[in-house]
Amino acid sequence: MYNVMSPKAEEFISHEEILESLAYAEENKQNRPLIDEILNKAREKKGLSHREAAVLLDCELEDKNQEIYQLAEQIKKDFYGNRIVMFAPLYLSNYCVNGCEYCPYHAKNKHIARKKLTQEEIVKEVTALQDMGHKRLALEAGEDPVNNPIEYILECIKTIYGIKHKNGAIRRVNVNIAATTVENYRKLKEAGIGTYILFQETYNKESYEKLHPTGPKHDYAYHTEAMDRAMDGGIDDVGLGVLYGLNNYRYDFTGILMHAEHLEAYKGVGPHTISVPRLRRADDIDPDAFDNGISDEMFAKIVACIRIAVPYTGMIVSTRESQKCREKVLHLGISQISGGSKTSVGGYAEPEPEEENSAQFDVSDNRTLDEVVRWLMEMDYVPSFCTACYREGRTGDRFMSLLKSGQIVNCCHPNALMTLKEYLEDYASEETKEIGDKLIEKELDVITNPKVRDKVEDYLANIHNGERDFRF
Ligand code: SF4
Ligand code: SF4
């Protein structure tokens, strides 16, 4: 039975509730008065229930679909302005005991190169990432208690935070590792991680079990309840995601919103981020073997409807998506993107030789970070390398209340400009620097409080003179 407050996966992600919601959405996909009512509620910018959002996702009225896109754009502007936070993934190890059918790291893949970074290699990789200008990483590792135990992950985090190269520093390490115990989540919290990210892949239990035939990940309940355990272990910020293409997208869209509702109701804090990865071609994986692929148009609609349903949740799109597709969804609600990514174990310090391919998936957007930063600025976005909230203790419910009251913008915008300035001074090409300096000048006008503006101008001058790490 559906119960948002239940600790049991099958009750807070009730299969029956999803099917009923989907049937309701199907019945009402042309119900103009109902769609208007839902859109009016959405305009209050306090979010929608999974059932209401499912109706918008299915909506077949062209004029109402345009309203959905406009509203998503408005919400994105109101909560996140024109800032886009930058990050890069760092793959630590592709040893994995699981049998995920869509991932080349599955245990039965005998021809992929298996690698695990040593601490010395991590120093090289992170130095290369710092030299690109990154300040925020997402660590990725397969599940393997022998090769990648929690002690290894903790050691890597310690190494990464300790690397100071020129003006570089990784200031926030997010972690994407397999579902684990409360005790291990506590250790990750103590190691100073930012967000704990775990993709559900699919919320459909039957498909989930088929897609994960072997290994600990087969246990649907243990995986689905992981975020509750992470929060019990003291981690405030958790990141959800499903892998679109594996299962029916309507099902997983509804499921992820139910998961968000559960976290908010049961733990008092909704998800910090939602990622929207789509299945990609990779070694031993053919996306055509999965018949749930979604078009770019539907992908954009999913992004817009998530934006409307959970306005307080950051949204992430990775280099799995092409430049064109990323352009299409940025204004609809994306607040974070990766840039200059490598999806192999290693590869930042030196390119990986072809015969040693260890990549998890093919990257669609192969541009350098400098190119991505310039591209964003040319579209009038402000690339941000900000990590201030986590470092100021603004996490979990504290962060959410600042976000909900709209106060966070007073921090985000100045921080974006200052961290962009650091990037321009230390890492940008001449062309990018020129565009960036002009953009900062223009964006200073967005700061309406004269005292804050004066302070930001002082800090920017200090950054130009070689000082670093100012924040609000
Ligand atoms: Fe392992 Fe994760 Fe790949 Fe599954 S998705 S095979 S758990 S690395
Ligand atoms: Fe993110 Fe906080 Fe920085 Fe805003 S101030 S960009 S919410 S870390």
Image (tube, rainbow, N blue to C red):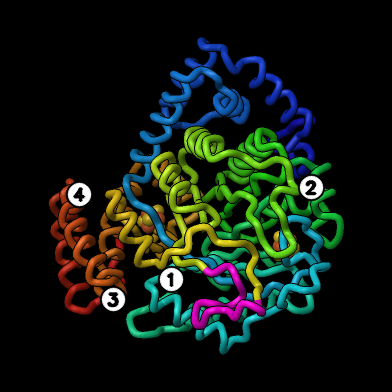
Mark 3 or mark 4, which is nearer the start of the sequence?
3
C-alpha span from label 3 to label 1: 16 Å
Horizontal and vertical percent position of residue 472: 30, 60
Which region shows up in magenta?
342-356
Q: Is residue 189 above or below residue 158?
A: above
Kind of element beneath mark 4: loop
Residue bearing the label numbered 1: 171
Horizontal and vertical percent position of residue 234: 60, 60
Residue bearing the label numbered 2: 208
Q: Is residue 131 above or below residue 195?
A: below
Residue type at the position of mark 1: Arg
Q: Is residue 164 above or below residue 415?
A: below
Mark 4 or mark 2, which is nearer the start of the sequence?
2
* Viewer-nearest residue: 99 or 195: 99
Assess whether mark 4 and mark 1 are in contact (beta carbons under 8 angstroms): no
Residue type at the position of mark 4: Ile
Residue bearing the label numbered 3: 426
From the image, state whether disc 1 or disc 2 is nearer to you.
Answer: 2
